[in-house]
Image: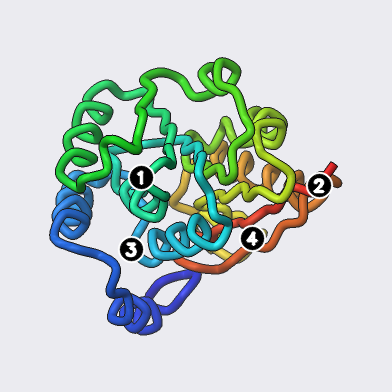
């Protein structure tokens, strides 16, 4: 049974999701076989809604993997919109670029290869929405820079903030996740909730998604 959302509820939500297609389904199936760290379709649908409702034109993604989440984002962008996405694994970058072509969104996506912790200091904002799904131990180190890159009223969306429930003290009897990652995410959650520049809500969907809006000014 799912530790955050019961399996039956997740199956019900999946049955209602009509936004996926053959390309996304194929990438998801391949990713599951290869045990890649991909979001699931319900988080993809949430990203699509957030990009659409904010009228986002410039989006930054940390952690491209093979392009699955990027396709959900790029398809919600207007024709003149742009997704800038960062991935340090060259093999995944190659696969992502191929998948963006297959999905028909390559013209709206630019992939940067390298360590996102360094690359974020080489890009200019403002971004309307930033999706953080990279190395968990870089979450805190990158937070201040990501807030700086975000426009007032823009959204910082962070995946895996509940970490299969392991960030909750004493909730999981036998933790399975890397203890350093768990500690890093717990620290990140505390900083998100206490940062005066942000207002944050955590949605207990799949592995937990934090949605933070940057205050104006």
Label 4 belongs to which residue? 168
- What separation in Å lies between label 3 and label 4 (alpha carbons)? 25 Å
Quick one: SS at disc 4?
loop
Label 1 belongs to which residue? 70
Q: Is residue 83 above or below residue 18?
A: above
Which comes sooner in the sequence, label 4 or label 1? Answer: 1
- What separation in Å lies between label 4 and label 1 (alpha carbons)? 29 Å
Residue 38 numbered tag: none
Label 2 belongs to which residue? 216
For the residues carrying marks 3 and 2, which lies nearer the camera in this image? 2
- Label 1 neighbour load within 10 Å: few <14, some 14-19, many 20+: many
- Label 3 neighbour load within 10 Å: few <14, some 14-19, many 20+: many
- What separation in Å lies between label 3 and label 2 (alpha carbons)? 31 Å
* CB contact under 8 Å: marks 4 and 1: no
- What separation in Å lies between label 2 and label 4 (alpha carbons)? 32 Å
Which comes sooner in the sequence, label 3 or label 4? Answer: 3
Which comes sooner in the sequence, label 1 or label 2? Answer: 1
Which comes sooner in the sequence, label 3 or label 2? Answer: 3
Left or right, residue 50 beside residue 8: right
- What separation in Å lies between label 1 and label 2 (alpha carbons)? 27 Å
Q: Quadrant of the C terminus?
A: top right
Residue at 51%, 19% in the rendered image: 119
Q: Which of 4/44 is in front?
A: 44
Label 3 belongs to which residue? 41
Quick one: SS at disc 3?
helix
Left or right, residue 37 beside residue 156: left
Which comes sooner in the sequence, label 1 or label 3? Answer: 3
Residue at 31%, 79% in the rendered image: 11
Give the x, y percent position of residue 56.
53, 49
């Amino acid at each position: 049974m799912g530790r955050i959302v019961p399996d039956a509820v997740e199956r019900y939500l999946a049955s209602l999701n009509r936004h996926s297609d053959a390309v996304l389904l194929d990438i998801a199936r391949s990713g599951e076989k290869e045990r890649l760290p991909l979001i699931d379709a319900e988080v993809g649908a949430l990203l699509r809604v957030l990009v659409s409702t904010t009228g986002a034109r410039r989006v930054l993604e940390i952690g491209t993997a093979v392009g699955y989440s990027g396709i959900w984002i790029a398809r919600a962008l207007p024709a003149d919109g742009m997704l800038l996405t960062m991935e340090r694994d060259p093999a995944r970058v190659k696969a992502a670029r191929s998948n963006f072509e297959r999905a028909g969104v390559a013209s709206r996506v630019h992939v940067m290869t390298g360590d996102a912790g360094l690359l974020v200091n080489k890009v200019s904002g403002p971004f309307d929405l930033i999706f953080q799904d990279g190395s968990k131990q870089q979450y805190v180190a990158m937070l201040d820079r990501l807030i700086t890159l975000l426009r007032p009223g823009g959204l910082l969306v962070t995946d895996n903030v509940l970490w299969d429930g392991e960030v909750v003290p004493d909730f999981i009897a036998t933790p399975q996740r890397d203890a350093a990652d768990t500690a890093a995410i717990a620290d990140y959650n505390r900083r998100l909730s206490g940062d005066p520049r942000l207002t944050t809500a955590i949605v207990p969907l799949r592995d937990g998604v934090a949605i933070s809006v940057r205050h104006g000014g």
